[in-house]
Amino acid sequence: ALARRGHRVTLVDGDVNGDVLSAVDARGAAELGVFDVLAGRATLENTIRQTVFDGLSVVPAVGRCIPEPELTFQDYGDSWASLLRDLSVRAPIVIVDTPAGMLGTTYQILGGATHVIGVLQAEVIAQRSFKMFSHCVAALPKGMRPKVLGVFLNMLQLGHSASIKVLQQACDELPREWLFDTAIPRSSAFLDASAAGVPLHLYRRDHA
């Protein structure tokens, strides 16, 4: 969406499970990923992949070789900060898709980010654990603490009372300026697009 508006954007997959490329069924296309850069086995130039959208590039999380388990336990906070600075020179907007949860790799990435967007799944268990979002952001040292741009409510089911209750609680409990006006519904359209291996916009251009 940002690239279509003329912005240069780099999307970094910070999840060792490689979920960004999985969404478009392209895991096999990546030779190297950002975790290879962190481990010193690759350079950014080797990992950046251009997409069919002008101005949009992707840095996969992993390539053909899965990183050693120990890699996810090491502190790469400084390396993430340096890597994000380098990427921001190439494109003014760098978006990192982090693993679920706020500790470990996600915490390291946040220390090098300028802003953060929270994603709250509109389900009861997710709502109960979402308090970790504000706690972990606040736990970062002031000089490394990203500004909260907002929180997206994801997978909202307007026909389900428990999902609506999550929306109501988010309105009551989150800072007023955090909750975005737009929520993302739970829709079969996302399943269909993922099955086809393309972003939603390319799957059905005529589907609002």
Image (tube, rainbow, N blue to C red):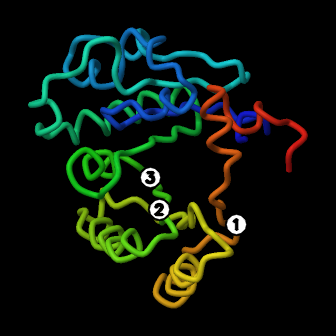
Relative to 198, is 162 on the left or the right? left
Marks 3/2: CA distance?
Answer: 14 Å
Q: Which residue is drawn at 86% across and 36% down?
A: 205
Classify residue 53 as left or right of residue 140: right
Please state the horizontal and vertical placement of residue 59, each as a whole percent of the image: 46, 24
Q: Name the residue under label 3.
A: 114
Label 3 sits on what residue type? Thr
- For the residue pair 63 and 136, the one nearer the viewer reads as 63
Where residue 201 sits: x, y (%)? 76, 37
Which one is closest to the eye, mark 1 or mark 3? 1
* Residue at disc 3, secondary structure: loop
Residue type for callout 2:
Gly
Q: Mark 1 points at which residue?
A: 182
Question: Mark 2, residues whose alpha carbon is within 10 Å: few (<14), some, or many (≥20)?
Answer: some
In the image: residue 88, left or right of residue 102? right
Q: Is there any visible trace of residue 176 in the rendered image? A: no
Q: In which quarter of the image is residue 146?
A: bottom left
In the rendered view, would you say 107 is above or below 118? above
Q: Which mark is residue 118?
A: 2
Q: What's the amino acid at mark 1? A: Thr
Mark sitting earlier along the chain (2/1): 2
Q: Earlier in the sequence, mark 1 or mark 3?
A: 3
Density class for disc 1 (Cα within 10 Å; few <14, some 14-19, many ≥20) is few
Please identify, in this view, whether the residue under mark 3 or under mark 2 is nearer the observer.
Answer: 2
Q: In this view, does 82 lie above or below 163?
A: above
Where's the N terminus, which quadrant?
Answer: top right
> How far from the left and from the top, in percent, is residue 128?
35, 77
Name the residue: 71% across, 45% down.
Answer: 189
Q: Residue 188 or 94: which is nearer the viewer?
A: 188
29 versus 86 height, above or below: above
Q: Give the spatial CA distance, label 2 vs label 1.
A: 13 Å
Q: Is mark 2 on a helix, strand or loop?
A: strand
